[in-house]
Image (cartoon, helix red, strand yellow):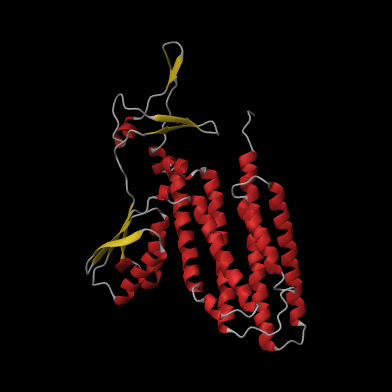
Amino acid sequence: MSDASANRSEVRKIQLTGGSTYIVSLPKKWVTDHGLSSKDQVRIEWRPSGTLRVIADASSIKRLRLVNIECNEIPDHMLFDHLVAAYLAGAHKINIKSNKTFSRDQKRIFRKFVRSTSGMEITNELDYEIELISLLNPTEMPFFSSINRMYLLLSSQIRDFSEILRGGDLEILDDADERENEVDALRLLLERQAGEILESASIEDSLGTSRWEAAELCKLVRTLERMGDHSYNLCDLARNYNVPGGINMNSLPVSVIPIWQTSIKLLMANLRKRKISEIHKAKSQLIAARADLMQYEEELRRSDIALEDALFMDKMSESLRRICSYSINVAEILMNIQTHRDSREVYA
């Protein structure tokens, strides 16, 4: 056991008092660290696992997570990664220091980080030190609503791509970069929230999900972000290459798009619903669609289609196939969640 774990764990004897009440004393350090004293009230919750959780509702102490970043110890090309790591760690304040004046490139990275995250703002900027704070209250950001927002963004990218294939104006893709950035920012926000759920009982309760479920939802969020990457790739493909003429919307690979749209809609609805049959149906449709795309790509390589058109169709098919694969992963994550929700603990 690590020193940190040992400091948070003590063995206490159960005592009988008054002939009918069992009591366990609270560690003095825990009481003082939370600013509690005799006669203050605590809330005790009986968890489904059988464990008891003691919550210091009466505590007036507020704790903030601080991360210090020393720029002289970090290569510039890794600086953004360290800022993201601090954000995902749940930092409420990030102090960035340097032993020399910040360069233009470093300041550009700081601004990029603020644009790429939700709630982070620069509050103090000096030549050698910058302070960022989080203005975000995690309990005010509905977890499931943010996941649904990610789904709507990537779905709209694919819908617009389909419109281009039908001869639509490329202007409808003008905000593709903006939507891609929003998907990435939501992924970071949701991963941060999931981490806070794992650490805080009050946030767990306010966001309406358990710690186990939050871990699974974190996997789902990462999967949606990867799907967003490929939906953006499709839009980028349409913007940068000539769309082959005479594309049949009822033939592969384009015919997979409405199948995916129907399937992912069923899956996202089952974040709240409890219809496992719909998850089975969606996954089966996606598996069949993926197999069709794999076969299409094999046949495309043996066809006599013009090289430029073949490259376009191959790239489109690959992105759609990967989107289907990630959607299959979503179905499996939802089955994990449903199984956990339906399970119950029994005595061995």
Q: For this view, does 56 lie left or right of residue 194?
A: left
Image coordinates for residue 169, horizontal then vertical, percent:
57, 80
| Quarter of the image with the N terminus in it | top left
Please tell me which residue lies in front, 111 or 179: 179
Image coordinates for residue 23, horizontal then vertical, percent:
42, 20
- Does residue 32 appear in the picture of this structure? yes
Q: For this view, does 266 lie left or right of residue 181?
A: right
Image coordinates for residue 119, horizontal then vertical, percent:
37, 58
The quadrant in which residue 6 appears is top left
- Farthest front residue? 168
Q: How many marks?
A: 0
Please tell me which residue lies in front, 96 or 208: 208
Query: Is 64 drawn above or below residue 239 in the view shown?
Result: above
Please tell me which residue lies in front, 265 or 61: 265
- Does residue 225 appear in the picture of this structure? no
What residue is at 28 percent from the left and 28 percent from the top?
37
Image coordinates for residue 33, horizontal then vertical, percent:
30, 37
